[in-house]
Amino acid sequence: MADVFQLPFHSLRFSSTLLTSFASSLKTLQPGLAPTMSSDKRVYPLAYSSAGGIDPFSFRPRKQLVSFKVRATIAATDQPKWWEKNAPNMIDIHSTQEFLSALSEAGDRLVIVEFYGTWCASCRALFPKLCRTAEDHPDIVVLKVNFDENKPMCKSMNVKVLPYFHFYRGADGQLESFSCSLAKFQKIKDAIQTHNTARCSIGPPKGIGDLILEPSCVPKDRPIEST
């Protein structure tokens, strides 16, 4: 069998005689196929044998598309999830202790607590608008409570639908609570306008009263409904 070796593509020079001979060889290898004219003229490196012939099976397009798809997939996995795109004054809460500490550290600032689920379509639809509202009011604090991570605390606070909101402020404690969807987002704006007025509280932050620190067990059930 003749040895086959590769020649660098940039070093090849073709004469009209060689190209004519190559075209004749293709017709011999594929009888009965009419010659076709294609506007897509691509040139690939040829493999020559020591016997002087051309290996017709050496035409292999470079697999650039596969590597592109792999890079695109890796880049997509680096993007933050929708509930992770927080405004600067938004804080993720992972435990009851973190929740109580955040309320205490907020002092006399208005605190909005959003109870949400990563699987909740209404929560996802409302979230971008909540972020913009937080950015428009840098003086308030928005605490985000993931229901699945804090089920005992959410149940003790009577959270039965998602998304759900609590409003707190200093010594006044909890001001109001309600469920809200994107279509009813004006409720949140009205509550901010009502409670985010200039005031000075007398006494320490009231917090949420008798909330008990629960162990880190997480029941598997979900809220009955979402708004």
Image (cartoon, grey):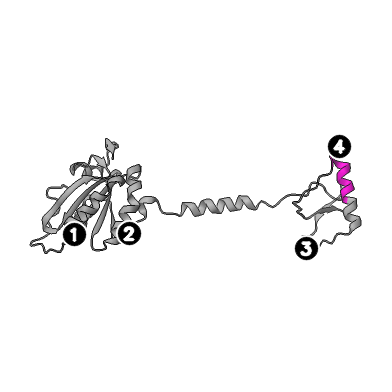
Measure the alpha-carbon separation of dots 1 and 4. 84 Å
Name the residue that disc number 3 marks: 10
Name the residue that disc number 2 marks: 87
Quadrant for residue 102, please give it.
bottom left
Name the residue that disc number 4 marks: 32
Name the residue that disc number 1 marks: 196
In the displayed structure, does residue 183 sit left or right of residue 172? right
Q: Nearer the viewer, residue 141 or 8?
A: 141
Which secondary structure is most common in the magenta stretch?
helix
**Percent position (x, y) of residue 140?**
23, 60
Measure the alpha-carbon separation of dots 4 and 2. 68 Å
In the rendered image, the vertical position of residue 11 relative to residue 223, given as above or below:
below
Q: Amino acid at mark 2?
A: Ala
Depth check, mark 1 against mark 4: the one in front is 1
Residues packed near mark 4 inside 10 Å, few (<14), some (14 to 19) or many (20 plus): few
Quadrant for residue 134, please give it.
bottom left
Q: Would you say the residues marked 3 and 4 are in contact, meaning their CB atoms lie under 8 Å apart?
A: no
Q: Residue at x 11, y 56 (%)?
A: 172
- The earlier-in-sequence mark between 2 and 3 is 3
Could you tell me if residue 51 is visible in this image? no
In the displayed structure, does residue 136 sit left or right of residue 65? left
Q: In which quadrant of the rendered image does the C terminus lie?
A: top left
Q: Amino acid at mark 4?
A: Gly
